[in-house]
């Protein structure tokens, strides 16, 4: 690609225009998140059976193994974020991350000891750090702030679909094709994703003076299919440098980080615990367990609507509502049902609560960085990833310990109580106070 900051694509083919378009970026990022979570979800019904039945482990070992993904993600995320923001190159690190996902997935297929499973899981998390941090930063580069809620809601639908389809595919392939089949399938899919990232053109950043407000306002209204080399204006050289510490000093960002950590702990904690519960209570097979998890995919299609509503109603209030929904659904999932299929309705509510909680958080963090006047989009989304990673590590480990000492019902009650206690952190209490005072003054 040419080295200039502006390229005239009007006389080029549709194929070339697609490589430079916002829509192309959104599709590739969505595919990348889908692939990452497909691979993540495939192991959910497989690992508990593998560790407990084949390696003679226990639920604590299962929980720790699930949490190792988050450990790798936590290690890799800040590194990818800082390098990506510093060198303003998103495509090559994404390619490296996807190649790493291929290698780690193949390592899963060849692992025959618990130690090798742990190493493969950590490597999978490292690869996921590139996909998440750089992919979300790329969206913030090319889409205006006012549209980030809807765009990220749509893109995160792919993430949730990949997560929910993964267990069903993994369970079926594991049961009918053997232990290696799910991982060979995922490795092949990741190779296709690598080729898609290779196809995408690296967006060029226009270095526009901050005082040219009329140019910035005009670019906010550019159509989704406009070539992104002509519309990216995020990386202005006049924007001040922000560190992660600076970002965490902002209460809006800190509250988002806390919200993500708690919600991710609960959502990740059910992953190792529910398969064990279903196997012990209903003697469910790997394929049945996998398809039960698909119940969480249906609400994911509401993520774009949630993004629109959060942009209009208020992102913090929507996130707090999602945490309360998850708190209510948690103990309902753990009730003693006469049939395994009765667990599906509360599991769907549980699945809905995740996009309600997390979809507004991403644009809220992006908008806050924009208001702070700093070019730190990858770093703020790295904070999101780090918070999610911490939650993804804490949740499974806590779940494994509680499942070993007590039972699934106790675990879900603890999760529900934690969410109720932490849900107020997302509320803008200053705004609530002002609206309350204004209401009483009018009346």
Image (cartoon, rainbow, N blue to C red):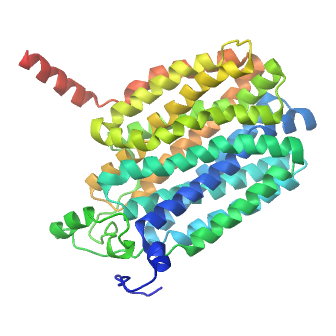
Write down the quadrant of residue 360 in the picture. Answer: top left
Indicate the position of residue 97 as horizontal and vertical percent values. Answer: 63, 63
Residue 429 in sight from this viewpoint: yes
Q: Residue at x 29, y 35 (%)?
A: 313
Residue at left offset 37%, top offset 76%? 229
Find residue 225 and report its image quarter: bottom left
Q: Is residue 48 left or right of residue 69?
A: right
Give the side of residue 402 with respect to residue 421, left or right.
Answer: right
In the picture shown, does residue 419 fall above or below 18? above
Q: Is residue 391 left or right of residue 39?
A: left
The percent position of residue 212, horizontal first and vertical second, equals: 17, 70
Left or right of 337: which side holds 301? Answer: left
Between 252 and 1, the one nearer to me in the picture: 1
Q: Which quadrant of the structure image shows residue 343?
A: top right
Residue ID at (66%, 13%)? 335
The x and y percentages for residue 165 are 67, 43
> In the rendered view, would you say 265 is above or below 173?
above
Of residues 284 and 145, the one nearer the viewer is 284
Image vertical order of residue 309 relative to residue 347, above or below: below
As rendered, which of 125 and 159 lies closer to the eye? 159
Seen at 26% across and 69% down, the residue is: 238
Q: Position of residue 443 (x, y in %)?
A: 8, 15
Q: Can you say whether 333 is above or below 206 in the image? A: above
Residue 202 seen in this snapshot: no
């Amino acid at each position: 690609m040419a080295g200039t900051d502006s390229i005239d694509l009007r006389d080029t083919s549709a194929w070339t225009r697609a490589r430079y378009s916002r829509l192309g970026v959104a599709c590739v990022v969505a595919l990348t998140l889908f692939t990452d979570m497909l691979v993540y979800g495939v192991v959910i019904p497989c690992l508990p059976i593998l560790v407990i039945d084949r390696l003679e482990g226990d639920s604590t070992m299962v929980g720790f193994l699930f949490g190792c993904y988050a450990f790798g993600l936590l290690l890799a995320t800040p590194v990818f974020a800082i390098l990506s923001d510093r060198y303003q190159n998103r495509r090559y690190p994404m390619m490296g991350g996807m190649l790493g996902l291929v290698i780690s997935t193949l390592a899963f297929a060849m692992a025959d000891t618990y130690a090798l499973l742990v190493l493969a899981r950590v490597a999978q998390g490292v690869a996921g750090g590139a996909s998440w941090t750089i992919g979300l930063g790329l969206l913030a580069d090319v889409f205006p702030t006012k549209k980030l809620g809807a765009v990220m809601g749509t893109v995160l639908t792919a993430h949730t679909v990949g997560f929910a389809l993964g267990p069903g595919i993994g369970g079926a392939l594991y049961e009918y094709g053997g232990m290696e089949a799910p991982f060979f399938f995922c490795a092949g899919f990741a190779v296709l994703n690598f080729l898609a990232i290779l196809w995408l053109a690296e967006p060029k950043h226009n270095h526009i003076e901050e005082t040219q407000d009329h140019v910035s306002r005009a670019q906010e209204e550019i159509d989704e299919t406009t070539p992104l080399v002509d519309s990216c204006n995020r990386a202005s050289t006049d924007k001040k440098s922000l560190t992660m510490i600076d970002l965490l000093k902002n209460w809006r960002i800190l509250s988002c980080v806390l919200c993500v950590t708690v919600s991710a702990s609960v959502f990740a904690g059910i992953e190792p615990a529910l398969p064990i519960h279903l196997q012990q209570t209903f003697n469910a097979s790997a394929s049945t367990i996998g398809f039960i998890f698909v119940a969480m995919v249906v609400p994911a299609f509401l993520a774009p609507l949630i993004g629109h509503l959060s942009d209009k109603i208020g992102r913090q209030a929507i996130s707090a509502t999602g945490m309360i929904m998850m708190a209510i659904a948690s103990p309902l999932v753990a009730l003693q049902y006469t049939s395994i299929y009765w667990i599906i309705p509360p599991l769907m509510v549980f699945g809905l609560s995740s996009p309600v909680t997390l979809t507004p958080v991403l644009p809220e963090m992006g908008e806050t960085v924009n208001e702070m006047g700093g070019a730190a989009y990858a770093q703020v989304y790295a904070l999101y990833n780090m918070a999610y990673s911490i939650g993804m590590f804490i949740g499974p480990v806590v779940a494994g310990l509680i499942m070993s000492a007590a039972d699934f019902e106790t675990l879900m009650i603890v999760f529900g109580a934690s969410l109720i206690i932490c849900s107020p952190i997302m509320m803008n209490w200053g705004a609530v106070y002002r609206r309350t005072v204004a209401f009483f003054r009018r009346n």
